[in-house]
Image (cartoon, rainbow, N blue to C red):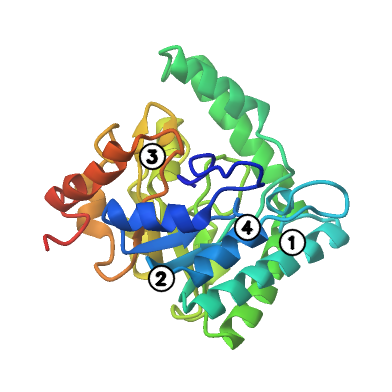
Amino acid sequence: MWSQGRFKREGAQGDDMTAFAETAARLGFPQIEINYVIPPAGVEALLANNQVVVSSVHSPCPRVACPDGRKSDALNLASPDEDERRLAVEYARASVDIAARAGAPVIVVHLGGIGAEIFSEERELRKLFDGGTRDGERVESLRQRAAERRREAKDEYFPYARRSLAEIVEYAGAHGVAVGLENRYHFHEFPSVDELPELLGDYPSQVAGFWLDVGHAEVLDRLGFFPHTRWLDELGSRCLGAHVHDVNGLADHQAAGHGTADWLHYAAKLPPAVPRVFEINQKTPEEQVASSIPFLRERGILPAD
């Protein structure tokens, strides 16, 4: 994520991923996650680099154009449109192939959601939050309406999400790659914290689990949907990794130390051995990226040495 637009090459499309790998290593990062925004040429450059190791691959990777003109990451794995769902699964399988080539043990998956658009209730809640209104009758009414809307529409989409997960897990397992379902930024997206046990119940931990995104957990808590503590308190044993970034208000993907995330909770609950990926906004200056490492060491998110 952080590489976008930072390593432009004159007269060439896409960023110079070799230069990104060299910069990541210089800033203190021995491993990287290949993000879903990286085009095929950039992925190949990262696979060929000798500066950093690939810890994980964020599906759907690489980013390519779909037949209808959309980008591959715009497809919905929970879509009732079977053509769209099958193509989304195909792109997820391509991510597995990349992970297997890289020796990365896990892919991160967005499982889709109820339609493709943020609920109008959530959009209004975000505006109220940004304006300083965090509770009250209007806020509670919007939360309830969003919950009802999600509940009423879930049966139309959730079975397709489960089918897509099954197909991806089967392919990934055959290639020695685990599937990590990421908790999402918007309320209409799968999975909720209550849906994860059902989604993961058919699979052993080494085949499928969940991938904690700290910022997403914090944001949905601040909007009043799910306490951020529930993800690890209830499902910590199924956590395969984490996107680690800070949150300023509802703005996530901030460098650690530049927001108000509950680092004490994550330090206590994150499984020690799982990777921590710094999924940081591309506008973040290098010095803030580098300073995230000592900040998180001091708070116990990263080992002291």
Q: In this view, does 218 lie above or below 122?
A: below
Instruction: Name the quadrant containing residue 300.
Output: bottom left
Question: Mark 2 vs mark 4: which is more N-terminal?
Answer: 2
Residue 295 on image: x %, y %: 18, 44
Q: What element carries label 3?
A: helix
Amino acid type indicated by mark 3: Glu
Residue 195 on image: x %, y %: 55, 58
Question: Mark 4 vs mark 3: which is more N-terminal?
Answer: 4
Q: Nearer the viewer, residue 179 or 205?
A: 179
The mark found on residue 88 in the picture is 1
Tag 2 and tag 4, C-beta contact below 8 Å: no
The mark found on residue 218 in the picture is 3
Mark 4 neighbour class, 10 Å CA radius: few under 14, some 14 to 19, many 20 or more: many
Quadrant where the C terminus is found in the figure:
bottom left
Q: Can residue 62 be seen in this view?
A: no
Q: Distance between the residues labelled 2 and 4?
A: 32 Å
Q: What element carries label 2?
A: loop
Residue at numbered disc 4:
111
Amino acid type indicated by mark 1: Ala
Q: Residue at x 43, y 30 (%)?
A: 251
Q: Is residue 299 visible?
A: yes
Q: What element carries label 4?
A: loop
